[in-house]
Amino acid sequence: MKVKDVIEYILEIAPFKDDFGEIPKDDAIVFGDGNTEVQGIGVTWSPTVNVLKKAEKEKLNLIVTHEFLFWGYSETVWFNSGKDIMGKRPNALRHKILTENNMVVYNTHKNWDAAPGWGMCDAFPDLLGFEEEINRGRFIRVHKIEPTSVLHLAEIIKQKMKIPVIRIAGDLQKKVSKIATAVGGLGQIYGIAEEPYKLGAEVLVFGEVVDYAVRCCVEHGISAIETSHVLSENPGVKNLANKLKKQFKETKVVFLDASFPFNHII
Ligand SMILES: [Fe+2]
Ligand SMILES: [Fe+2]
């Protein structure tokens, strides 16, 4: 079986629908060759140096990743970004492991987020135990639960996701029953609260969120709960790993956890 056979299967179960137009440029083999024979598949949220080291140990030569492989050049006045892409330390470290092990990296994103029933957008509320979907945007989901305070909801989410610390904004005592989820990095978009507000949500559970987006929630009268980018997307990553395991029974498939990156002090 070749790399391109695996990609063909992924695009079959997570197609780019009309909403996304053509297959975007960031959905591509970003390292190596599609005709390479697959020895083993590593499925990950991000191909960090640690993740690639795990892949090397497990003898996996195809990495299927949700997030990007190499840090790029930033056209910005705010810092002096190097144009020598492979000269950047993280890129050089990743590149060394990839070349030494003849690995191939396939980067696929929006279709995986949106894959019906098992992609990131549906897998996150599923992990949180939200069953009754009452509304949805393209990536936002809104579920109904028994009324509970924002604080109690945050405590439940913290336990379910096994996160050591969670940030909450807005009225903590407010009783809520309509919960929106904004998986992964959707909370990096400043004005994202507009959509869950229109969809009737009373609280928005993020993966990762920036300050502006939190304030936008609060000014829409919505409380905000932040979990983690990687931990909110890992359920969707695991789902794809399981699907590949079932489809390619003879091939070793491993979920490679990019893992929660923080420690904390209180
Ligand atoms: Fe995502
Ligand atoms: Fe993401």
Image: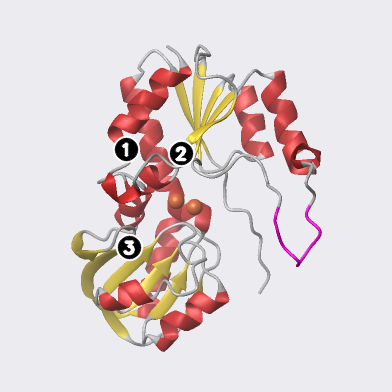
Label 2 SS: loop
Q: Quadrant of the C terminus?
A: bottom right
Mark 2 and 3 residues: CB-CB less than 8 Å, in contact?
A: no
**187, 30: nearer the viewer:** 30
Label 1 SS: loop
- Magenta stretch, residue numbers: 74-81
Name which of mark 3 and mark 1 comes first in the sequence.
1
The spot of residue 256 in percent (x, y) is 53, 35
**245, 173: nearer the viewer:** 245
Q: Which mark is residue 35?
A: none
Q: Mark 1 is on which residue type?
A: Ala
The spot of residue 215 in percent (x, y) is 49, 83
Q: Identify the residue under disc 2.
A: 108
Q: Mark 2 is on which residue type?
A: Thr
The spot of residue 8 in percent (x, y) is 36, 24
Q: Identify the residue under disc 3.
A: 140
Within the image, what quadrant is residue 251 found in? top left
Mark 1 and 2 residues: CB-CB less than 8 Å, in contact?
A: yes
> Horizontal placement of 101 versus 165: left or right?
right
Q: Mark 3 is on which residue type?
A: Ile
Within the image, what quadrant is residue 32 found in? top right
> Horizontal placement of 227 versus 128: left or right?
right
Q: Which mark is residue 14?
A: 1
Q: How is the image coloured?
A: secondary structure
Name which of mark 2 and mark 3 comes first in the sequence.
2
